[in-house]
Image (spheres, helix red, strand yellow):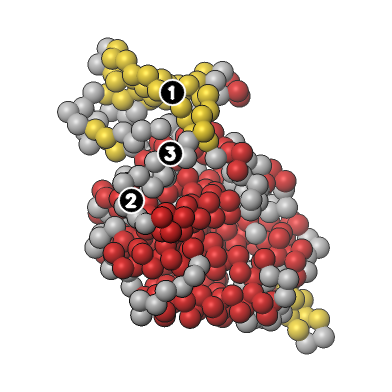
Amino acid sequence: MLPGQALGASVVKPLARGVNEPRQLASYSRSTRSKLDSNEPGSCGHHARRFGQISAALDSGQLQFRLSLSLVSDQRGTMNGATTSSSLKVAFSHCVQQVRNYDYHHYLCLLELPTNMRKAGFALRAFNVETSRAMDVASDPKIGLMRLLWWQDAIDKIYKNKVIEHPTAQALASVISEQKISKSWLKRSVDARINDAQRDASDIYETIEELEKYAEDTSSTILYTTLQAGGIKSTAADHAASHIGKASGLLLLIKALPYHANRHQQFSYIPVKVAEKHGLLVNQGGRLEIRTDSRERLSDVVFDMASTANAHLQKARALAETVPKEARSILLPAVPSQVILDSLNRVGFDVFDSRLNRGILGIPPLLFQLKLKWHSWRVDELQGKKIGIALEGGDNLTSLTISVPIARSFELYPF
């Protein structure tokens, strides 16, 4: 089972709707998900806590876990088992903090990795944070571009075993020295961001395929390198990572449309062909621009883009049976991608709806963590039976009971 896919889920059909039909993503018949249903940079520190109390009881052939939803602070063990020097410990701690502050949903995903893979996971994701934020934190676009060029040069130096006085670069260098990570993937990620930074605000992507390539170059590459760091060589895992990365990249660009519209007064991440299809493309003095004055038409555009992302998640799920078990925790970013899709669906694909900025990607933090935990469980044998979930406390979510049939062996990641 691939992350983001519930046990017993039915085959998902492609998105389709008639002229007068409401926008709605293809539904997933998930009996287990039906009851479990702005990550702004730097705003999620108060959510960085995890579940605390678990009790287990044997009842009528069911192994039952009861989880109290009281929260406890939990930063212990994030880098368990790492033997590093004092300076490297500081560097890796910096990486963890950067990911936690600026990419919180992926921070939670990385906590589900096996301990021996977390160092690489956090270093690679922190590298992505550095490059993805370069243009946003710079007061001048030229300064942002200089930061990206610095990272381009830093990668070359790291592979030449040169010392770089930057915590993320130091952590990345340590991981690269221990694992076989392709330089080409890291270079491809930075090069894509440099090319994007050099675009003029009016230089809009022509097709959705061009935007998909950008998403793969910047998001899928992080999954590719994490798989490499884990020593996982699997064509199926690579293909799944490609689709999940494309979906994740597209959906994060969709969610950030209001930010970019406010910053540049332009929807620079809506492809020309898609905007033209829905009447949002205008010619202003010989320059093509995308209108920002019609939320209804924009919702139609977002629906089309989200449909492309949804198709990639479907393709990743189709590979579920062939993806090695050890690769599945690395592919957990499929879960936040599905969460964004579900959140967009609930608000009618209106990216300006304030509900998208609540909690984590539009849902309560506890619920997001539950979804991740659900998909991180490994059940070797279920004897053809489904896992059952019972919630108590209504909207307050005071407690959760999870029941699974007794099997000869199973693995449960601790909270």
Q: Is residue 311 visible?
A: no
Q: Which residue is mark 2?
A: 82
Left of 266 or right of it: where is 243? left
What type is the residue that disc 1 sits on? Gln
The residues bearing labels 3 and 2 have C-alpha atoms spaced at a distance of: 13 Å
Asked whether 412 or 240 is in front, the reply is 412
Of the two numbered discs 3 and 2 on the same chain, state the one appearing first in sequence.
3
Left of 131 or right of it: where is 30? left
Q: Residue at x 64, y 81 (%)?
A: 199
**Element carrying mark 3:** loop
Mark number displayed over residue 150 = none
**Disc 2: CA contacts within 10 A as few (<14), some (14-19) or many (>=20):** some
The residues bearing labels 3 and 1 have C-alpha atoms spaced at a distance of: 16 Å
**Disc 1: CA contacts within 10 A as few (<14), some (14-19) or many (>=20):** few
Q: Residue at x 64, y 50 (%)?
A: 42
- The percent coordinates of residue 150 (x first, y second) are 54, 78
Q: Quadrant of the N terminus?
A: top left
Q: Which residue is mark 3?
A: 76
Q: Nearer the viewer, mark 2 or mark 1?
A: 2
Q: Residue at x 47, y 76 (%)?
A: 154
Residue farthest left in this picture: 408
Mark number displayed over residue 53 = 1
